[in-house]
């Protein structure tokens, strides 16, 4: 955690009465607001009228911001701001301010900025409703284009894309007690300040004030769109009370089914997911760990201990359209996201929470970093980090990566003849593997955990795919999870990331083979 930043007041030496020149708006102003807010009892933000909350999806989508009214469109900035109306998922408005030079002005609600699906709805919308959030635009495709690349709306959620991506997974300001029996809290951004950028600026800075039952927070974001869109994030948190599980830099995504799961009855698409795995880089051991995602039968939480987290992210490694065959959803173009701390956060855990979902409409995957010790009330904490959104190679991992993971019955042709066992296939490519000859002495290091029995494992080169395949046959203990860790080596040198997987006893594959 970094040290506190300090604020300096600018004064003129003069005789009485002394003239004091006020500071321009700064991050410290947001920190001061968050600290003052933490000293008060939490008050839920006022709800928008019920008829807006009860709008159908179709009617809410019919309230459309007029592109020609985009903020800064008539100026010389490359960036633009489009505004989001409250309603449906967005139950409260947020205050939005614009910083232009040394002037800071509130952005008052203007219902004429929107087209409405019918005159009756337009008439009911209050003149002082407010906005639910904002979208930022930038010319990705051509000089005069206004391509949306970042959206802030709903609690502390935001979504971002790189140049070649469609929107998919989300980031959040903070996660509180995600997956715990006590129930999750959803702190929300309640106010934003947007700095108008210069004409030649390739980045935009804005600030957010967060408030929730258990804590407040001050955030500074500097976003730079491009092939990869990056956000430099500074956050200062003020817990009102002790927080059992605080999730720093959380990422939220969706995994319905994939190559490592059974296909639901009636589904024709090969795979459906926004992300297919969690990647973790532990700086203390320099281990890179890959966990394919799953749609569990019940809530599943995994804690990956890291002495010094160098990075973690939810990735969409499979970017082949043929893996999804869905021209409308475009899962092959969904972005990956990678979080890198700016300094040493100390020991902690990368937590992966996976919830069951019956379809693709629910975000059921959450990943975040949690400090080893819970955050304490009446203290302050600072976390600075970078989040990048783009294609799956944004982690810059030097080792070979798991490209495909398949699981099936270990007692059938092509799987084996071991009753109650699971055949696991993992294909690796990239990194040092690409420099090896097909007859190189590549070996596997495999461990079956949870008292599982490792029956066999071997490595072979696949000429058609130019990959190295690790095949494992593992029998989980009775009524225990299937839990495996594996990597490829040449002698004592690790060639690949560590592939790790877990299936709980109620998982569809385990039920199918028993």
Image (cartoon, rainbow, N blue to C red):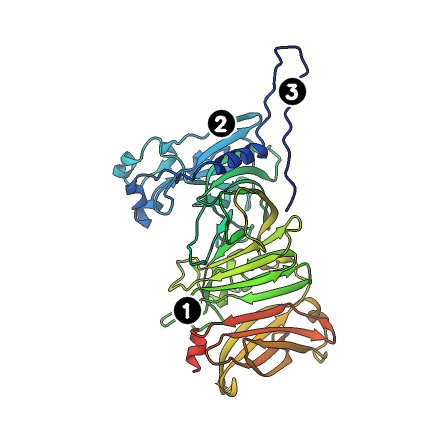
Q: Earlier in the sequence, mark 3 or mark 1?
A: 3
Residue 64 in view in this figure: yes
SS label for mark 3: loop
Could you tell me residue 132's position as x and y percent? 41, 40
SS label for mark 2: strand
The quadrant of the picture occupied by the C terminus is bottom left
SS label for mark 1: loop
Reply above or below: 150 against 275.
above
Residue 52 falls in image quadrant: top left
Mark 2, Cα crowd under 10 Å, few <14 / some 14-19 / many 20+, is few
The numbered dot on residue 475 is: none
Could you tell me residue 6's position as x and y percent? 64, 33
Left or right of residue 46, residue 281 in this image: right
Q: Residue at x 36, y 71 (%)?
A: 266
Disc 3 to disc 1: CB gap under 8 Å:
no
Mark 3, Cα crowd under 10 Å, few <14 / some 14-19 / many 20+, is few
The residue beneath circle 1 is 297
Q: Earlier in the sequence, mark 1 or mark 2?
A: 2
Gap between marks 3 and 1, in whole Å? 63 Å
Q: Nearer the viewer, mark 1 or mark 2?
A: 1
The residue beneath circle 3 is 11
The residue beneath circle 2 is 105
Gap between marks 1 and 2, in whole Å? 50 Å
Q: Earlier in the sequence, mark 2 or mark 3?
A: 3
């Amino acid at each position: 955690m970094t040290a506190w930043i300090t604020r300096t007041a600018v004064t003129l030496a003069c005789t009485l009465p002394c003239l004091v020149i006020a500071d321009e708006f700064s991050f410290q102003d947001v920190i001061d607001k968050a600290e003052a807010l933490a000293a008060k009892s939490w008050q839920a933000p006022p709800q928008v009228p019920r008829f807006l909350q009860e709008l159908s999806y179709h009617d809410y989508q019919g309230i459309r911001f007029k592109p020609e009214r985009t903020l800064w469109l008539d100026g010389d900035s490359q960036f633009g701001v489009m505004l989001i109306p409250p309603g449906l998922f967005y139950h409260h408005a947020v205050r939005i301010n614009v910083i232009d030079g040394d002037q800071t002005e509130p952005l008052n609600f203007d219902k004429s900025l929107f087209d409405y699906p019918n005159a009756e709805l337009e008439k009911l919308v209050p003149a002082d409703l407010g906005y639910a959030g904002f979208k930022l635009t930038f010319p990705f495709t051509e000089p005069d284009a206004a391509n949306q690349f970042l959206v802030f709306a709903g609690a502390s959620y935001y979504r971002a894309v790189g140049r070649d991506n469609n929107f998919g997974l989300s980031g959040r300001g903070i996660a509180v007690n995600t997956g715990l029996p006590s129930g999750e809290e959803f702190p929300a951004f309640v106010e934003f300040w947007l700095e108008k950028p210069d004409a030649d600026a390739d980045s935009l800075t804005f600030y957010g004030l967060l408030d929730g039952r258990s804590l407040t927070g001050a955030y500074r974001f500097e976003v730079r769109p491009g092939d990869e869109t990056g956000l430099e994030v500074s956050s200062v948190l003020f817990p009102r009370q002790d927080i059992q599980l605080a999730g720093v830099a959380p990422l939220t995504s969706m995994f319905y089914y994939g190559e490592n799961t059974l296909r639901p009855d009636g589904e024709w698409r090969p795979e459906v997911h926004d992300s297919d795995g969690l990647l973790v880089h532990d700086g203390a051991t320099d281990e890179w760990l890959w966990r394919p995602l799953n749609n569990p039968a019940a809530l599943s939480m995994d804690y990956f201990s890291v002495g010094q987290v160098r990075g973690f992210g939810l990735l969409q490694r499979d970017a082949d359209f043929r893996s999804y065959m869905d021209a409308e959803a475009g899962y092959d173009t969904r972005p990956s996201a990678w979080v890198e701390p700016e300094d040493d956060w100390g020991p902690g855990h990368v937590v992966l929470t996976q919830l069951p979902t019956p379809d693709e409409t629910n975000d059921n995957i959450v990943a975040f970093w949690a400090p080893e010790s819970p955050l304490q009330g009446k203290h302050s904490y600072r976390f600075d980090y970078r989040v990048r959104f783009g294609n799956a190679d944004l982690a810059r991992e030097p080792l070979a990566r798991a490209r495909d993971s398949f699981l099936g019955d270990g007692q059938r042709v092509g799987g084996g003849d071991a009753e109650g066992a699971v055949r696991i296939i993992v294909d690796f490519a990239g990194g040092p593997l690409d420099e090896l000859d097909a007859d190189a002495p590549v070996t596997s290091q495999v461990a079956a955990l949870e008292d599982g029995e490792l029956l066999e494992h071997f490595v072979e080169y696949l000429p058609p795919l130019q990959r190295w395949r690790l095949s494992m046959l593992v029998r989980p203990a009775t009524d225990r999870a299937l839990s495996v860790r594996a990597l490829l080596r040449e002698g004592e040198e690790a060639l690949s990331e560590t592939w790790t997987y877990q299936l709980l006893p109620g998982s569809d594959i385990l039920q199918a083979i028993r």
